[in-house]
Amino acid sequence: MRKRIFDGILLFLVSAIYLAAMDQNVAIDDALSRVYSSASKIKNAKVISIVPFEYGPGITFKSVEDKIVLKLAKTGNFKVMDKKSLETIINEQKLSLTGLTEQTNMAKIGQLLNADCLLFGKVTLSGESIVINVNLKDVATGAVVWADEFVGEDLNKISFGPGIRSGFFNGSVNYLLNDGATNFTTVPGGSAENQFFFAFTGSFEQRLQGLKAISFSLDGIFYRGYFQPDPVAAAIKIGANDYIFRSTSNYTNLKLQLCALVKLHPGYIFDWGNDVLVLYFGPGLDANYMLADATYRLTQTTGGTFDSGDITYKKTIGQILAFGGMTFRVGIELKLSTNFSVFMEAFYIPEITANMIEADTKILPKVTIGQGNSTYGLGIKYNIF
């Protein structure tokens, strides 16, 4: 059984890392989305021959030249020859790719292919981006006719990692007690707030090609909150009988929020050269699962509703499962590195009141969480991938 569980966890992690890996094909398409507008400025080139590109470490997609050919051909300003034509001439003339930069060889290749320009390129990885550098050289003079750099990212991004969020996690407890018949009374159990809670954050982010200043993200945020009301000791009367009620409890709230966020990336608007700042906002759904580690004791001191003498009822555990409804989140994130960031946000926690699932007819705790609703927080997070 343990081996199966371990294998399942391992399979999940491998699958998640695979899904989170950069899709180089998508990133290259993103980088080349600007080629058409840039190449439209090329002057004095009638026939262009593509030289096989150089590929840096980590680049697994090695057909960028084929994509470049299609982009350049769409301009309609010149004829573009693919790399196979050049490779055939190189083999026939017993030349090397490294020797093409020499002026004599460039002129010779240009004459054999009837091309007036050769396009050289290099593809490298830079963090989470793919960088494509190209330069177009006149075969007769060696002068650079056109040069540009194209940077692309994987537009679909999955991330997951732990974080610490500070804020307000509020809760209160009231107890509805009865004597086993039809007589009821309510005892307040006090309230407490927790200012720090632990959270895991996972997200799927969709970026738009050609409009990187805006992205859409589906964020799942898992909280672990905790609060401990003050102990309760109260003498009460239920019907004609006297009781003493005592309670000692603490509550662990497991909260899951799923938010659909719109993210704004000023770095692409103002051409900062990075994506260090992100603004985000959007609605979501909130669900809660709460565990109570508690002792509830109801002792009859007079009367004979129960068996004669002092009767004590003791309850030691309880659960709550409840949907909290709609939530809303707005914040700003500062990326200090590829995986590490800090953020400040305001969010709305819907208030819910729910009975314990394992409630007894004599002691019915009603737990309320989310009091105060709107709150704010500071936090840090680190994406494992």
Image (cartoon, rainbow, N blue to C red):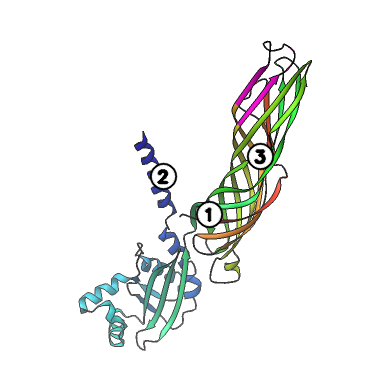
> In the rendered image of this protein, does residue 327 appear above or below residue 42?
above
Tally of marks: 3
Residue segment shown in magenta: 294-315
State which tag comes first along the sequence, 3 or 2.
Answer: 2
**Residue pointed to by mark 2:** 12
The kind of residue tagged 3 is: Gly
Front-most of residues 271 and 245: 245
Asked if the residue at tag 2 contacts the one at tag 3, i.e. Cβ–Cβ closer than 8 Å, the answer is no
The kind of residue tagged 2 is: Phe
Front-most of residues 56 and 9: 9
Left or right position of 289 against 232: left
What's the CA distance linking mark 3 and mark 2?
29 Å
Q: Residue at x 42, y 56 (%)?
A: 21
As drawn, the residue found furthest toward the bottom would be 141
Residue 161: x percent and y percent? 50, 52
Q: Is residue 95 magenta?
A: no
Picture quarter with the C terminus: bottom left
**Residue pointed to by mark 3:** 325
Mark 1 secondary-structure assignment: strand
**Residue pointed to by mark 1:** 205
Residue 310: x percent and y percent? 68, 16
What's the CA distance linking mark 1 and mark 3?
23 Å
Q: Residue 143: in sight, yes or no?
A: yes
Mark 2 secondary-structure assignment: helix
Q: Quadrant of residue 120?
A: bottom left
Q: Residue 75: in sight, yes or no?
A: no
Q: Residue at x 60, y 52 (%)?
A: 165
> In the rendered image of this protein, does residue 270 appear above or below residue 232?
below
State which tag comes first along the sequence, 1 or 2.
Answer: 2
Q: Quadrant of residue 360?
A: top right
